[in-house]
Amino acid sequence: MNEQVKEVTIEDLKNTPRYELYRKMSAMMKGSPKPGRYVEFLPTVFNTVLAMREKDPIIMFEAVIDELRKLWNLSPEMPVSGPWHHTIVPGVLITSLRNNGYPFTDEDVEEALKRAPSFQPRLAASSGLVEPPLG
């Protein structure tokens, strides 16, 4: 039996509910996946945000940044300001809601953390939107 592989379309990507599946489908569409330069640091960001028990998102964001400053290696490949900041904001917002009693799980927080870096930096300039809240 000859199984045909379905070609991935933009509409397929738009309707994909979880980031991991989105990344796999996106890679299939592009032909060759390439991890970003922040990929190795993102698990540290995830663990730091998930561990927070603060309820105020502004205080939590500052605490996350303070904690991450202790952990990152400053280099041209990993500067202080970079796309990983975009990952933090949606994660902090969902974690703060979770810590205030809203029914969000660690999986929901991780999903928010994973989605933000998927938005292209030029999106803000072309659409008037800022990436962090889009996560």
Image (cartoon, grey):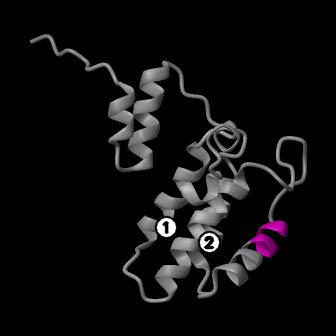
Please give the residue where the numbered disc 1 appears in the rendered image: 109
Q: Answer yes or no: do the residues labelled 1 and 2 have beta carbons within 8 Å?
A: yes
Image location of residue 39, percent across then percent down: 65, 45
Residue 30 covered by magenta stretch: no
Image location of residue 18, percent across then percent down: 38, 50
> Predominant secondary structure in magenta?
helix
Mark 1 or 2, nearer chain start: 2
Q: Residues within 10 Å of mark 1 (few under 14, many from 20)?
A: many
Which residue, as the protein is rendered here, is positioned at the far front?
128
Q: CA distance from mark 1 to mark 2?
A: 8 Å
Q: Which image quadrant for residue 29?
A: top left
Question: Image height check: is 105 above or below 53?
Answer: above
What is the three-letter code of the residue carrying label 2? Val
Q: Which residue is found at the position 40% from the left and 74% from the top? A: 105
Question: Image height check: is 42 above or below 23?
Answer: below
Residue 69 covered by magenta stretch: yes
Q: Which residue is found at the position 62% from the left and 50% from the top? A: 129
Horizontally, residue 76 falls left or right of residue 60, namely right
Q: Which residue is found at the position 35% from the left and 49% from the top? A: 17
What is the three-letter code of the residue carrying label 1? Val
Which residue, as the protein is rendered here, is positioned at the far right?
75
Q: Residues within 10 Å of mark 2 (few under 14, many from 20)?
A: many
Label 1's element?
Answer: helix
Please give the residue where the numbered disc 2 appears in the rendered image: 49
Horizontally, residue 61 falls left or right of residue 91, namely right
Q: Which image quadrant for residue 57?
A: bottom right
Question: Image height check: is 88 above or below 62?
Answer: above
Label 2's element?
Answer: helix
First to last magenta residue range: 65-70
